Amino acid sequence: MKVFVNIKKIGGVSASDVSVKKGKEMSEFEMLENTFMVVKNGRVAEHGQMREYNADKFKDYEIIDVKNRIMMPGWCDSHTHLVYAASREEEFVDRIKGLTYEAIAKRGGGILNSAKKLAAATEEELFQSACERIRTMIAKGTTCIEIKSGYGLSFEGEMKMLRVIKRIKEHFPLLIKSTFLGAHAVPEQFKNNKQGYIDVLTNELMPAIQTEKLADFCDVFCEQNYFSREETIHILNAGKKYGMTPKVHANQMSYSGGVQAGVACGAISVDHLEYVGDEEINILKNSKTMPVVLPGAAFFLGLPLPPARKMIDAGLPIAVATDFNPGSSPSGDMNFMISLLCIQYKLTPEEAFNAATINAAYAMDAASETGNLGIGKRADFFITKQIPSTSYIPYSFNENTVEEVYVSGNKIH
């Protein structure tokens, strides 16, 4: 049992039954000032004003002096590809010289490039490199992470990735979710037989994944030259039969129908959303699907910005994630994503914080456990350096304001 005292501000203390913030609600990021917080059994048990603090009541507790710093709920990163074998900076240079992401992919780059490199890597190599990346994410305040497969693109490769993710879950105290993204691209050997590859995904991989309990979600890259709306629905419905909740890579390069496919399948989230119009917004308003924007990918690839401001003003929720991957968003820094939301997408800091916490937790089916610091939630949070206000976090976009990180009330950084 622990008591954190002399907290300048605690952010994200909405009621524990709040699982999502929509529209105008996103501007409400509840704060307590000059307070203390009690943690029991790894969960938030009590908040109180320091002027009412009774030292005798907590004489048997471990007392942690926060020293007038700010406490924030840990960031929830609901979309990452952080298990990969090697970086792809050569493609970065190609894009500088004028090649598009699609052109690079057509000549064997992109996802197929990562698949080739992953095939040559051992599980141990993948595990060790992923652990290094996760440690950098923790240092920036992330305490909840979703990790996708999708660079295997074969039975052996996808199973290898998912086993690595399972090992990561067991190694770190973070709340970690796994996603089967075998439908990330069509491998070279199936380029003239896409249905044959889909059959491998649905008839061979999915039963094996269920047997070993390797995936919480099933995802599909619904995009031109990848998987159509109809193929996406087929794959996601198959995944549901094997216990995997749908997610969709939707509308990154075009109006692909990914949003429609996701809503039709009851997807928990549709992610990317660079190409979203009134039709997609109206469909999302009548669903329980979370729109997730990935500012790092749009920034790195020079894509149109998703209309996040328009979606919020229409009454939708928004979540944000890093899309941490070697090809289109080589960063797991949620602080930078929050800064981009404020600077480029014109969200207020409060809206951006809700997008990175409670709404992001919802996008990975974790809002009942984490995403805010309400009573009963996991005590997953970070303590900032001495900063003047919470708005300083997105304002100081090239500075890490995170000093200490706690998961279930235990310091991990």
Image (spheres, rainbow, N blue to C red):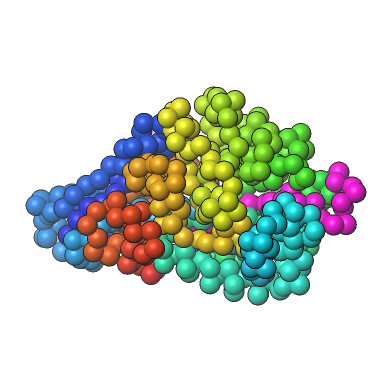
Q: Quadrant of residue 408?
A: bottom left
Residue at x 89% of width, y 47% of height? 193
Residue at x 66% of width, y 43% of height? 253
Residue that extends furthest to the right in the rendered view of this protein: 192
From the image, which quarter does the C terminus lie in?
Answer: bottom left
Say how many tags the image has.
0
Residue 202 versus residue 296 in the image, above or below:
above
Question: Quick check: 402 left or right of 286?
Answer: left
Residue 65 versus residue 323 in the image, above or below:
below
Q: In which quarter of the image is residue 167?
A: bottom right
The magenta segment: 172-195
Residue at x 40% of width, y 41% of height? 346
Question: Quick check: 401 left or right of 198?
Answer: left
Residue that extends furthest to the front in the rendered view of this protein: 97
User: Camera-side residue: 32 or 169?
Assistant: 32
Question: Quick check: 8 left or right of 44?
Answer: left
Coordinates of residue 403 in the picture (x, y in percent): 32, 67
Coordinates of residue 80 in the picture (x, y in percent): 57, 56
From the image, which quarter does the N terminus lie in?
Answer: bottom left
Residue at x 58% of width, y 30% of height? 277
Q: In which quarter of the image is residue 148?
A: bottom right
Coordinates of residue 243 in the picture (x, y in percent): 66, 43
Residue that extends furthest to the left in the rendered view of this protein: 51
User: Camera-side residue: 107 or 260?
Assistant: 107
Question: Is residue 112 visible to us here?
Answer: yes
181 inside magenta stretch: yes
Question: Is residue 360 visible to us here?
Answer: no
User: Camera-side residue: 221 or 394?
Assistant: 394
Question: Quick check: 353 left or right of 123?
Answer: left
Coordinates of residue 154 in the picture (x, y in percent): 80, 58
185 inside magenta stretch: yes
